[in-house]
Image: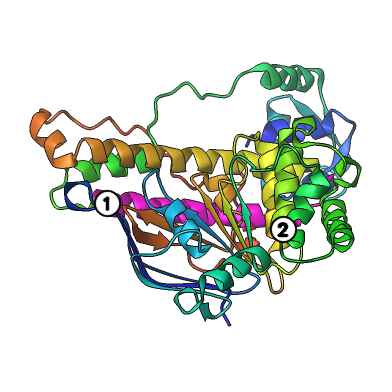
Amino acid sequence: MSVPHALLALLSEGPKYGLQLREEFEARTGEVWPLNVGQVYTTLQRLERDGLVESEGAADEGPQKMFLITPAGDEELGAWLRTPPDLASPPRDELVIKVLVAMRLPGVDMPAVLQMHRTYLVQLMQQWTRIKEDAAEDDLALLLAVDAELFRLDSVVRWLDSADSRIKRNPVGAVAEETSPAPLPRLRRTVGVRR
Amino acid sequence: MTALELREVSKVYGDGAAKVDALCGVSLTVEPGALVAIMGPSGSGKSTMLTIAGSLEDATSGEVLVGGRALSSMSRNERAQLRRRSIGFVFQNFNLLPGLTAAENVSLPLELDGLAARTARKVGLRALEELGLADRAARFPDELSGGERQRVAIARAVVGERRLLLADEPSGALDSVNAEAVMRLVRTACRGEVAGVVVTHDAQLASWADRVVFLRDGRMADQTPPLPGPESLLAPGRAQ
């Protein structure tokens, strides 16, 4: 979630105070992404330094300070909305690495490892679904935000299912014997299943 | 009293070289008001578990209790009556009778159970109304959309005094928004005295349940613990 761009989007509607920005941010994201006040002011400071917003009012940070978007900020927001997020990189997430490592360790009960992660993910999905169940029908922001999270977790469960079935067809021992000990994918950054 | 209880249930198909252990000593308890999802890959035994729970086929060994009564202690007639009165089934392909209207499809199980046609029709119409289908009551299944057909199937499954709702991939080939609508209905139906068991391979659908049970090769591989409150997901500092 890009907090700077979300704040720019809110400011594109007109000048706003810091506290007001925090409340509106939470309302628009269905309160799925809580923000603390400190985070809001730090982000605004950075945006101001980069010339994307300017402020009016008391020189000190505080509730009396009003923020406005600059033409450069407008331009940045427009460019951000049109830029596809970085989804093209190969999977390097922590769960994939764990499963690949587990496959190479002797004596690991692969189905049990996969199931442990599957149970955890479905549990998380149950909690998100509860939020969806309690949401008002017209709270579109919340419904969309929760759906996004559910689809993301669901895709990980599906990956576990497919890993399970691939390993069942081609047992891990057999894979390990046939495959030369190729190095594991380089772990440049770890992205957990939980943000 | 539990709504459904499976005690060490096993099911074997065929024998000799063709022997298949579809279920191996599975136990499950479903309390009234609870919705339990059974997840597992194809061939894991989840549909077999549902048909045994619904008394549509017999277990090879073990005991099944519906509403506290052991199926093995019931006569054939009593079991047929239990299926008509207390258990509602929802199948992937809806299984509506094409020659009957939506209302007639819903009231049929009540009529089969001896209720006067007029009364049965009234109860059936009320069930359709509750699912937002009052204006579709006189339509035939082929005049309904997929989502509407499945809602009729759910109305038929919950009509009358049903206590146990058994659903096998109830959202079938519906798109995700219609599938969600189906699960909301199933969720709403499973309150008070009514319990439900949904079999699915779809984690999004399963996540509507209070508890998710995972089957693998006919055995229970795991299940989710009781749900914590949603507050745990909304802890401060999740935004980046």
Q: Earlier in the sequence, mark 2 or mark 1?
A: 1
Q: Which numbered marker is on residue B14?
A: 1
Q: Up-down: is A174 above or below A126?
A: above
Residue B133 in magenta stretch: no
Q: Residue at x 86, y 44 (%)?
A: B137
Mark 2 element type? helix
Tag 2: amino acid? Pro
Query: Considering depth in this image, is A159 or A85 the residue closer to the camera?
Result: A159
Chain of the residue on which disc 1 is drawn: B
Chain of the residue on which disc 2 is drawn: B
Asked if both marks, 2 and 1, belong to the same chain, the answer given is yes
Query: Considering depth in this image, is B33 or B19 the residue closer to the camera?
Result: B19
- Using residue A111 as the reference point, say whether residue A183 is left or right of it: left
Residue A133 in magenta stretch: yes
Task: Report the span colored magenta.
Answer: A110-138
Residue A23 at least partly seen: no
x then y, percent, for residue B99: 75, 38
x then y, percent, for residue B165: 63, 61
Q: Residues within 10 Å of mark 1 (few under 14, many from 20)?
A: few
Q: Which numbered marker is on residue B109?
A: 2
Q: Quadrant of the N terminus of chain B?
A: bottom right
Q: Up-down: is B167 above or below A141?
A: below
Q: Residue at x 76, y 33 (%)?
A: B145
Tag 1: amino acid? Gly
- Using residue B90 as the reference point, say whether residue B24 is left or right of it: left
